Amino acid sequence: MRLPVAVKVGAFSLVVMGTYTYYANSIPQIQSKPPAELSLEGGNVTTAQLVKAGEEIFHTKGTCEICHRIGQKGTRAPDLSGVGARAAKTKPGMSAKQYIIESLLQPGAYIVEGYPNIMPQVDKPPIALNRSEVWALAAFLESLGGNVDVTLDDIPKTAGAAAAGGAPAEIKLPGDPKAGEVIFSTKAGCIACHKAGKIGASPVGPDLSQIAKIQTPDYIMKKILDPAGAGTVAGFPKGVMPPMFGQSLTAKEYMDLVAFLLTLK
């Protein structure tokens, strides 16, 4: 018996769809997930495991690579090659682990010559590492040329308090990011010196594509109004960023610009 053409076509379509479905479901699916929170309190961990965890934090959640390099000069912050050995000689009376921990939790306590005071506290937003993560990161930094002897007890129990309750609440400012993007490219003229994601390409000033990932809203707001007071990023000329945005921009334009910069993550 001859089957109608419509039936043949329908049957063929089902076979093709079934084949594609089978192969599609056999392909491993890639999911985008936020960085997992590390917790080592009360658990046993070897030095090697701790250093490995710290290295991963350095490259991911800690966002350290945005400013620092290992084995080459960074644009915003010092080269960390050999920091585990240098740290013991940086501040008299301080061991390597003490200096490294202070540098992570109170980065403004000691500023390396030639670099501005722009590093945020790693246990506070926007980075917000918890106590275990600070411990692992300190261990990794110690391992760069030094001996790892940092313990969890060396990390203050108050470290990471902002991260302990989960992700920090997102700060909402009364600005329009879309309008701020226009201000960035036109009236403020930021595009003449800075790159911000797909916008701009000038190397005169630092790349701002991830500025909200490494700096607080407070820093960003102050930097626009008082660029010299906030320090000049290492490797870039001083006094280039104009200090008159507080007068040239309206209050709305200023808040719109800040709102746009806070989207750059």
Image (tube, rainbow, N blue to C red):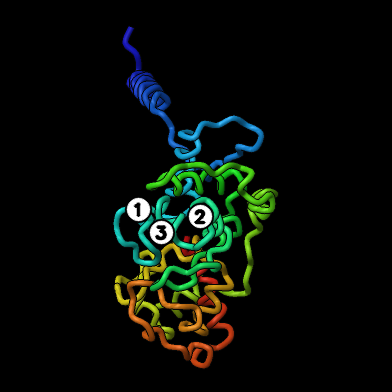
Instruction: Work out whether mark 2 precedes mark 1 in sequence or the reverse, and give the earlier one.
Output: 1
Mark 3: which secondary structure? helix
Q: Which mark is drawn over residue 66?
A: 3
Query: What type is the residue that disc 3 sits on?
Result: Ile
Label 3: how many Cα within 10 Å (few below 14, some 14–19, many 20+): some
Query: What type is the residue that disc 2 sits on?
Result: Ile
Instruction: Work out whether mark 3 precedes mark 1 in sequence or the reverse, and give the earlier one.
Output: 3
Number of disc labels: 3
Judge whether residue 199 can be spotted in this image. Answer: yes
Q: Are marks 2 and 1 in contact (CB under 8 Å)?
A: no
Q: Would you say 191 lies left or right of 61 here? A: left
User: Please, which residue is most extreme toward the front here?
Assistant: 93
Query: What type is the residue that disc 1 sits on?
Result: Ser
> Front-most of 15 and 4?
15
Q: Measured along the vertical axis of the image, is residue 205 above or below residue 245?
A: above
Q: Would you say 95 lies left or right of 236 here? A: right
**Residue 135's x, y, as percent?**
56, 45
- Residue for badge 2: 100
The residue lying at 54 percent from left, 44 percent from top is 150
Label 2: how many Cα within 10 Å (few below 14, some 14–19, many 20+): many
- Residue for badge 1: 81
Mark 2: which secondary structure? helix
Q: Measured along the vertical axis of the image, is residue 227 above or below residue 88?
A: below
